[in-house]
Image (spheres, coloured by chain):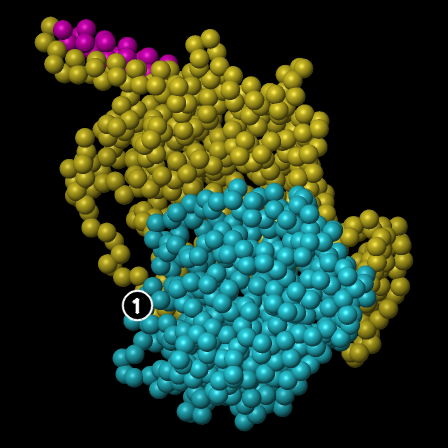
Amino acid sequence: MSLLNTLARLEAVRSGRAEPLATVRHRHLSERPMVVVPVAAAGEEGAPLAVLLGTDRLAPRLFIVPQPLNRTQRFDFLAAFAGELLPYLESFADAVEQIEGSEKDPESGEKIPVVRELCADAPQLIVPNPGAVRHLALLGRSTRFRRTAEDADPGPYPAPPQVPLLGRWLTHLAERAQVPGSSMLLPMTGLLARHWATGQSHLEDQHLAAQLAWHHPPDGLTGAEAAERAETGRDGDGRLLHPPAGPLTDPRFDSQVLAPAITRHDAALAALRQAAPADTDRAALHVKRALERLHEALEAELLPTWRDLWQGLDLLRGLPPAAHLPERWEGDRWSYTGHRDRVAAGEPPQPRRDDAVTAARKLAQREREQARLDIQEALDDPLAMAGHRLAGEAFSGTVTEVVPEYDTSGRSPKPRPLVTLATPDRPHADPGREVHRAGGPPTAQRAEIVAAAPGEVTVRLLSGMGRKKEPEPGTVPEVGERVVFTLFELTARQSAPLPEPDDTPWTHGGPPGAGQSSPVGSEEWE
Amino acid sequence: MTTAMTVHQPPVLFGVPGPGAGPDGPVPPGAAADAAVAAILAETVHPVPGAPRGVVVDSPPGAGKSTLVVRAARELVAAGERLMIVAQTNSQVDDLVDRLAEKGPDLTIGRLHAADSRPAPEALRHGNVTASAKAGDLLELDVVISTAAKWQWVKDTDPWRHAIVDEAYQMRSDALLAVARLFERALFVGDPGQLDPFTVVGTEQWAGLSYDPSGSAVVTLLAHNPAIRPHRLPVSWRLPATAAPLISSAFYPYTPFRSGTGAGERRLTPGVRADGSAVDAAIDEAAEHGWALLELPARHTVRTDPQAVAAVAATVRRLLDRELSAHSEQGSTPLTAGRIAVGTAHRDQAAAVRAALAGLGVPVDPAAGPAVTVDTANRLQGREYDVTVVLHPLSGRPDATAFHLETGRLCVLASRHRHACIVVARAGIAELLDEHPSTEPVQLGVAVKFPDGWEANHAVLAHLAEHRVRL
């Protein structure tokens, strides 16, 4: 945790309210996000119990698995979930823009112009917490290889046709969520924690309702008191006022409400199976009622989280968007477009495991995007830059003197002016260290530290001043101007090329062979 | 920076055991080391048909790894081969070029560097060294050396028949994936006890895969080439007899090594008497026993604990003021600024120590002459000094995170010295450790590392407690 974050947390403890960590919003928010609250059965991480989802805060849809251990019911649930989610995901596929680019011709090696489609917008899923992201990834992993009745060999337990497609999309979204700065699948606790500090620990911030309680504590309560009430407050029946936001459930709800309701439903089903023909209608009515009870119980358990998620979105929408958001969202749009194309082209689902080259490529992409995110956040937000300044990795100040000097070692003299600034910051700036000007001329500007004393730093500008002897107007700061320099580079470095998977070297086991696809195992169903 | 480096004598010079050597066994250390090196060179230079394409050498701190690399390079060239060498950082590459050029004046050496950086002057002062940013300019030379990061960009060359990968345990698996196309066979040399490679993004999804891109290159190599049996260098020529047993048992419990010198062969003698201060008492303790713990009162502090930083700076100042002499098998030399290093866990701590030292008039800028090296564990890897002053990674902390507990971090900090190591720390680290047992999640398919940082920290702390001086 950075020093600035620690200070903000201390301030929140003192003020009793969440304190800002950002002056702008650093993640893209869709105008029409899909809000999803998934929960799993207790002790069965891979067994979904219910999901509450929708794009309209007044009309969430609930889907449940009445008996979470029953796989037929589980796949019926997944089919219903897919029926709600897939139309949303696919609704962004048709509106496209044409992007002109160039591509290397594989035969001649020459660059040829190409026009590529880029979807104008992309879907966005908002879930309560990182656990929900992992749960969706798990659902994706367990469904994307399911065979359906449409397959040549459907196997003994074919899944409904849209289930494997749901698995591929969930897998793609969960993978994309691993890329720093991406916004296609976002946990609300992380979103809030990026923009506001509370006076509690990171662990406590994982509780969505407790974190939100710091934002608008009721009159007369501090944030800490409101958070404690959100964590432990129960109604007259002993149910939590703010149940866990999933994928785990409240154990007391499980034992006192859920388990009896599931038992009743199981019993009603059993009775229906054994019912004499004359009693079938009555037995079916029992099943229907038991199902409705389950539905009501789970809806009541999930609705508080649903409301919390929309409240969190309201808070975030109150912040102005950061300047680099469209650029990063374009990365998400490319990712969406790419997956859309792979599905349309009939490519197989994502493999069970990445091969060596794919894993290395993904790691390189994530590291590059992390670097880019850190830089862009610092450039977009004075509070983010303040964190770097406090850490000695940047300094800001007012120019007190500019001395025009020249590098005369070459054929023609080049401008190398000395700029002295008064700064309250204490950068880790040894003489000779390269620094970069933030918010300077449009072209990047490098400088090097010439002297650093408490309260004053002198740098020599090295680039970004044009090609003439005198610097282009506006490229050298003037006396009285506020400037910011960073000790880190302001553009993310390119990643080095990696071999094609078919050229995987001997050190990494050679090319991934056909032997990697696992044989189809037999499975226990019920 | 190379002013701070000591070139190892080839182990063969120590073939005759000194009077204090060999308490650990009947084989004198020089002979044991020579046998290991001979086996490695034979396998590298004259591989038998069908032998694995890689040779792996595990080397504890200061066991003559760099000497081995230089010898292997010279013997390969003598056998008519050209080779490429991969190191991990630019300073490692520059050190290696300098050393290779000095030991092998008959070799032609290429220093491949990035377009926006210049190699260190020590690397370029030799007539047989050519520097270029383009691999194509250097293809005809006997040896071409660069960092893994630069090698990844080299293309359109025929593969070399031989490569040497230095500090291979520091190299990430994905870097090896990118450079392995450049060579047919390779000698991998490294220290398994040092810091693992790291990344700032999440990599859980690849944990347990043999080619986890964020893992160590050697781990991947061995997983895919089970026929490779790693060699070991059994003798540390750097660590004194006071340090080798502790470092060996705390960090290399299953691959023990010993020191090349015996008890009493390395000595530190002060020229100026102690002034009665705790700092001087700690220096005397370290001079006599090889270790000292300068302990400040227990307290939770910010990372750049001003009192601990001041204690580190004062210790370095007094080390210089007291005009110590270092006596060893290489003769007697005065302990100068260039032979002292300060190690910290974090960059901001290093910066704070540098500022405090500059305030006391201690030279810290290597460009202006011999200077005390102040750096983080990551950057001190592979370096060697006479005396080190270490700011304990857990000093003043309210918690013990995986970062601060990492075995390699403490191992690097505690194994850079030829004579003595002075650790500066707040009291209460043992209690802190007991309150924070390791709770890292267990990943399927990932080999559990022994010893874990918790245990290694306790082992080192228990030893240091015998050399405690309270400030």
The structure residue drawn at horizontal position 54% and vertical position 55%, both measured from the top left corner, is B462
- Mark 1 residue type: Pro
- Asked whether A111 or A135 is in front, the reply is A135
Residue A57: x and y, percent?
50, 21
- Chain B tint as drawn: cyan
Q: Is residue A291 above or below residue A398?
A: above
* Mark 1 neighbour class, 10 Å CA radius: few under 14, some 14 to 19, many 20 or more: few
Q: Chain of mark 1?
A: B
- Asked whether A499 or B110 is in front, the reply is B110
Residue sticking out furthest to the bottom: B106
Q: Is residue A34 above or below residue A367?
A: above
Give the residue pinned by disc 1.
B226
Q: Main secondary structure of the magenta part?
A: helix
Residue B286: x and y, percent?
65, 66
Part of the protein shown in magenta? A279-296
The structure residue drawn at horizontal position 43% and vertical position 28%, both measured from the top left corner, is A246
- Chain A tint as drawn: yellow
Q: Is residue A8 above or below residue B316?
A: above
Quadrant for the C terminus of chain B, please: bottom right
Q: Secondary structure at mark 1?
A: loop
